[in-house]
Image (cartoon, rainbow, N blue to C red):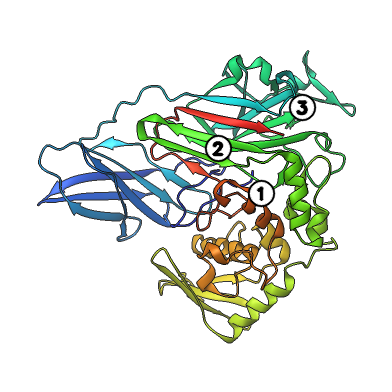
Amino acid sequence: MAVLTAALATAAAVAALPANADAPAFQQSATVKGGQLEFSFTPTQAAGYVDVHFVPKGGIEQDLRMDQGNGLAWQKDVPAPPAGTPVSYWFTHDYGPGSHYDTRHVSLGGGTPPSGTGTFPAVFQNNTHGKYTDDQIYLTVLGQQTPGKWSYLTPDGTVKPIDHTEAAQPGHLTKNGESYPDMSFSLAQAKDRSLTMPEHLEGGRIYISLGSPMYLGVAPDDSGWAGPDLHSATDPNADVIFDWYEFTYQYGKIAFGGNTTQVDMFGFPLNARLQQDSSHYDQTSGINMSRDQVFSQYLSSVGPAFKGLENPYRIVAPRSSSDFGAQGPDAGYLSKVIDQVWNEYHQKQFTLTRANQTFTGRVERDNKLHFTKDGAGEPGDNGDFVLSEPTSQDVLSCSGALASPGMDTTELELGAEFCAAFNRGVASDTSKWYDATKYYGTSAPSNDYSAFFHTIGIDEHTYGFPYDDVNQQSSVKILPNTDPPSRLTIGIGW
């Protein structure tokens, strides 16, 4: 999965939660004492931050950062509303990259506000101007309702577990001598070009393919499915034109969040309009240009190293190209600027302040950045947090030294910040890290691919690399509550 995203306190929301994750357990309360409304939230795992949201009846929603107390507990006291005033409240918390959660809305008395069914319609518009008819446009919808158990959607909205034996059943797909389950269906098979989306699907992905279904293998134990391998010329989807929309949603627990994405590639223009009538939410993300315009402007906008990312089927992201891999001709594309920045913080202190938090440190003799957050370090022998110098591949994929298993939550937070700063060409000056007008300048090499897709994305927002949600630059759109969208409309362009 690409994204989904936001480990940071400044991120508005996260687009793709970890596919095998569920919200951690917690205890919460709201109590009126001595003229104060006291909110308490205690997760079972350490949270990087906790926000409380509350709405007195007839009032305006308040969104406040909570104060960390002893251990895992968080508190926030506010003036109590007049006696007898109903208050709806919920919490937002995270405990690492891609693990942002909204709790269910509850009333001050402990009840749950009624909100009806949690399903919603996803409507698809064929905007290919006759290039592809509805029976030539295919949809493949995958996601998890139970952690570790994948399902796919049928045209009538039924959620079916993935099943490797379907590769041998009547109607299965075959390509290059291999058999695959048929989990795709044409837009013509969807009544009124619409799907009834379920009230719970996490790590969701809607593949849209033109002229062909998607060929996706399923593990023999049905534990997962094989997505397209953009590095492989022999992948069954190598000559399939496709793109996708990704989302996460659980009615009453996780607010719907979704996004178009160029984290891995661009196949053809998509735009997605997310609406919720009750909250007056109505926002659109994506690309409104034609495919020919995108390809033409891309080639005239990017540097020589990035031109080779284009082929007749797609434009691949540098992290998805062997050219920028460890053995590729552009393996060291960002190495020089990474070395310069790391050497700079050998010589002087590193300081980054954002979201009322300050990271401070220095690159020591071991060539690692040793740092603290708000003056506090990591318990242990060294007493600080550590980031190793990343490679160019680490930066373009936001992985390795910047995000890998075993890293502390605080290390992952700063790793995401460095990933964004290097991709945007502003890593040498932390005063520019949160100034979008300074991104992708000419003073330092940056990710030309991401820079281009920001210029053509609606409101100049897109997902150009995995942590593009740092400083809210991504295309993710998230509803303000855990009720369903009124509708999701996806335009399929050409």
User: In the displayed structure, would residue 157 be above or below residue 6?
Assistant: above
Q: Nearer the viewer, mark 3 or mark 2?
A: 3
Q: Nearer the viewer, mark 3 or mark 1?
A: 3
Name the image quarter holding residue 90. top left
Q: Disc 1 and disc 2: Cα gap in Å?
A: 14 Å
Name the image quarter holding residue 175. top right
In this figure, which residue is indicated by the disc labeled 3?
131
Circle nearer the N terminus (1, 2): 2
In this figure, which residue is indicated by the disc labeled 2?
247
Residue at left offset 75%, top offset 38%: 228
Task: Tell me the amino acid under the disc marked 3.
Answer: Lys
Where does the N terminus fall, quadrant-wise? top right
Indicate the position of residue 129 as horizontal and vertical percent values: 71, 27
Task: Tell me the amino acid under the disc marked 2.
Answer: Phe
Mark 3 residue element: loop
Say left or right for 1 vs 63: right
Q: Answer yes or no: do the residues labelled 3 and 2 have beta carbons within 8 Å? A: no
In this figure, which residue is indicated by the disc labeled 1?
263
Name the image quarter holding residue 59. top left
- Of 211 and 494, the residue lying toward us: 494
Indicate the position of residue 110 as horizontal and vertical percent values: 24, 35
Task: Tell me if mark 2 has few (under 14), some (14-19) or many (20+) residues whose alpha carbon lies within 10 angstroms of its own.
Answer: many
Q: Disc 3 and disc 1: Cα gap in Å?
A: 26 Å
Task: Tell me if mark 1 has few (under 14), some (14-19) or many (20+) residues whose alpha carbon lies within 10 angstroms of its own.
Answer: many
Circle nearer the N terminus (3, 1): 3
- Of 409 and 274, the residue lying toward us: 274
Seen from this angle, which residue lies furthest bottom?
A: 347
Q: Answer yes or no: do the residues labelled 3 and 1 have beta carbons within 8 Å? A: no
Q: Answer yes or no: do the residues labelled 1 and 2 have beta carbons within 8 Å? A: no
Q: Which mark is residue 314?
A: none
Say left or right for 116 vs 195: left
Mark 2 residue element: strand
